Image (cartoon, rainbow, N blue to C red):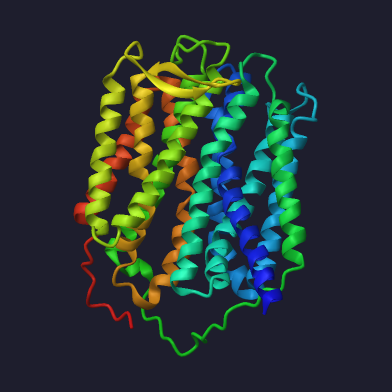
Amino acid sequence: MTNNQNKNIVAIVTMMFLFAMISFVTNLAAPIGVIWSNTFEGSNFLGMLGNMMNFAAYLFMGIPAGKLLTKIGYKKTALVAIAVGFLGVLIQYLSGVVAADATLLTLPMNFVIYLLGAFVAGFSVCMLNTVVNPMLNLLGGGGNKGNQLIQLGGTLNSLAGTLTPMLVGALIGTVSKNTAITDVNPVLFIALGVFAAAFLILSFIPISDPEVKSNKEIVFEKSPWAFRHFILGTVAIFVYVGVEIGIPGTLNFYLANITDKGAGLDPANAATIGGFVAGTYWFLMLIGRFIGSLVGGKVSSRVMLSSVSALAMLFIIISIITPKTVTTLMPVFTGTSFAMTQVPLSALLLVLCGFCTSIMWGSIFNLAVEGLGKYTKAASGIFMMMVVGGGIIPLIQNWVADMSTYMFSYIVPLIGLAYLLYYALLGSKNVNKDIVVD
């Protein structure tokens, strides 16, 4: 019994690391994008393409990941996901080895290889998202214990999201013409090491899949698409992930930009400050999720989503109209120590949006699947595909930034938040209660 408990503990710790790796790999794209943006003479659109490729993988792998889980089980799916993740990060590392003067389809070959690596890593993250939550629930024995492990995993996920842009920003330091992806090799080596260790550890841990009752006798007269509030909910998930990623990603670009278009920070540590401030956004998401877990049983999803959407809209509106000359102090790690550093007030307001976005996924999911009954599982697979919004919407936002200014580009997440407010107040109402869902 003790031996089994020890094996479970090792498996749980491994899953926790993988939970963190989901956020770690996902959040590499934006800070590394600062390097590529500088390479392409400040093109934010091209700088954000790596993020786009990472999230585009969800569109292709969302439903297949669920089918793979059903076919080969939790452990084998996790091992496949880890192996694919290792390959994706390795390809990104190899992009720094290729000569910068080689080209493919008018783009630098090293950039094309990096995009391929980001796309492959996206497949891994999608599969890990599909398997880690139910696997932690299984290892915890289900119920409150299983839920507790998932919540702890979510905390580590947010912590990794906090540290990743900070770490990359510290390694980049000053962005110049000589800055290259090889400057963040230590971060890529860490990712490769964690993936390799997780694969080896998980290989030797026996994990049994839960018994699943056959669905052969269940008749599906309709599909989730028959529900209006679900259709609008899929749009809400698409929009939400785009807003969540676009706010800190574009902020990182803005603060790290040392041209007149940027925030006007000291060129010597602008990238470091940008990474740390963007990381603070993810830290506030961690705090927000914790608070949300405390009040979630007392406040409805509709009230939570409408409240935070309206508050985030207010933060963004004030950010857009506030000149960058209006500054405030924020604690930032400058490379050697923490110090209070002057940043535009708009940066602080955008960081505070992390509190708001932290509880949106759960609220949207709950509202969208309300009353779906036997169609809920199919709905979950569709939701995983809609995560692609995290690639498309930030790309649109940074195209707007290229055409105008960074602050004006926040009109894109502002419109997205307005839609989420509409969904919370009106679009989430189930008007198809006549459909049989038992």
In the rendered image, residue 351, in percent from the top left (x then y), is placed at: 39, 32
Residue 276 % position (x, y): 51, 28
Picture layout, residue 288 above or below residue 174: below
Q: Quadrant of the C terminus?
A: bottom left
Quarter-of-image position of residue 434: bottom left
Front position in the image: 139 or 339: 339
Q: Where is residue 261 in the image (x, y as percent from the top left)?
A: 45, 13
Tell which of 132 and 34 is nearer to you.
Answer: 132
The reply, left or right, for residue 172 in relation to residue 202 is left
* Residue at horizontal 51 percent and vertical 86 percent from the top: 213
- Image quadrant where residue 10 sits: bottom right
The residue that appears at 61% across and 19% down in the rendered structure is 173
> Is residue 67 at least partly visible in the picture?
yes
Between 183 and 100, which is closer to the camera in this rendering? 183
Percent from the top left, x then y, of residue 336?
60, 20
Task: Tell me the quarter of the image containing the N terminus.
Answer: bottom right
Residue 208's place in the image compared with 422, above or below, is below
